[in-house]
Amino acid sequence: MTDFTDEELALDPHFADQFEAGFRPACQLYLISPPTIGDDFVDRLAQAFDGGDVAAFQLRLKGLDDDAIAAAAGPLQALCAEREVAFIINDSVALAQRLGADGVHLGQGDGDPKEARKLLGPKVQIGVTCHDSRHLAMEAGEAGADYVAFGAFFPTTTKEVTHHAEPSVLGWWTTLFELPCVAIGGVTADNAGPLVAAGADFLAVSGAVWNHPQGPTAGVAAFKDVLASKAPPPR
Ligand SMILES: Cc1ncc(COP(=O)(O)OP(=O)(O)O)c(N)n1
Ligand SMILES: Cc1ncsc1CCOP(=O)(O)O
Ligand SMILES: [Mg+2]
């Protein structure tokens, strides 16, 4: 893997796009499904959306094949469309294409974002896991990702994680690049302040919403203050 020099960054046409002047929107919630869902999940998702603004919903059902995920996706995708929430499929470009999803999230072992772009076209959002790596994030940006995801910031029981990120990576990214960044991993309304302050464009959250003692509506509502805690910085 090559490291990017300052000259390469300055000359690369894709990165140049990302330096366009503009305003960074406020931090938004990116909701991730629980690892398993029951028949009542569409109702629970609606309850979550009732709690406040959710920008995106990712269907992440590890261990199920594409047919099984597709069978579950219909009403969830319809609800997302009704509530104007982007519907994102985890891991599978083929499934995202088959369902006409708004986006796909790719980990480092889930396929090449450039190939995904060729298959999905320019309108579908492609997100890429970058762990705690500035290098992976720049590679993802160069490959045409629509967002980069850093994490895990905090301990989580939703996924076994091997990488730990610090908020400084968000500050570094947002100072240099327009491309949105997502903070993930054990994020709660109580610990998210430093992530928002560092410039996270999205908080990706699962357990804090689905395991909230007062239910998913309260789980989403709990993020309202921290999301509003920092005005979007001028760019
Ligand atoms: C928004 C977001 N960020 C990171 C991940 C993790 O993706 P990956 O590393 O491929 O791990 P799995 O989620 O597939 O277990 C994500 N899903 N979403
Ligand atoms: C999918 C994923 N990738 C890194 S941490 C994580 C789990 C996110 O869920 P939670 O918000 O419950 O920690
Ligand atoms: Mg993955």
Image (spheres, rainbow, N blue to C red):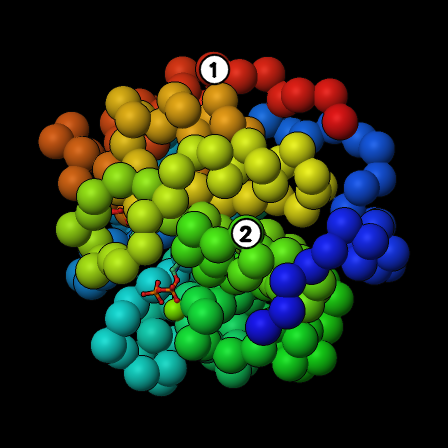
Residue at image position (50%, 27%) is 198
Q: Give percent across and percent down for residue 162.
A: 27, 59
Q: Residues within 10 Å of mark 2 (few under 14, many from 20)?
A: some
What residue is disc 1 on?
Answer: 229
The residue nearer to you, when weighing 108 against 39, is 108
Q: Give percent across and percent down for residue 111.
A: 51, 79
Q: Give percent across and percent down for residue 14.
A: 80, 58
* Image quadrant where one finds the N terminus: bottom right
Instruction: Answer with left or right where residue 118 lies relative to residue 137.
Output: right
What kind of residue is marked 2? Answer: Arg
The residue nearer to you, when weighing 182 against 70, is 182
- Indicate which disc residue 218 carries: none
The residue nearer to you, when weighing 94 against 69, is 94
Task: Note whether 120 is above or below 129 in the view shown.
Answer: below
Residue at image position (49%, 22%) is 197
CA separation, marks 2 and 1?
26 Å
Task: Note whether 3 is above or below 200 in the view shown.
Answer: below
Q: Disc 2 on helix, strand or loop?
A: helix
- Is there any visible trace of residue 74 in the rendered image? no
Residue at image position (49%, 44%) is 182
N-terminal of the pair, mark 2 or mark 1, is 2
Task: Note whether 171 is above or below 44 in the view shown.
Answer: above
The residue nearer to you, when weighing 176 against 77, is 176
What residue is disc 2 on?
Answer: 134
Residue at image position (76%, 50%) is 6
Q: Residues within 10 Å of mark 1 (few under 14, many from 20)?
A: some
Tell which tag, 2 or 1, sits nearer the viewer. 2
Q: Give percent across and percent down for residue 63.
A: 24, 77
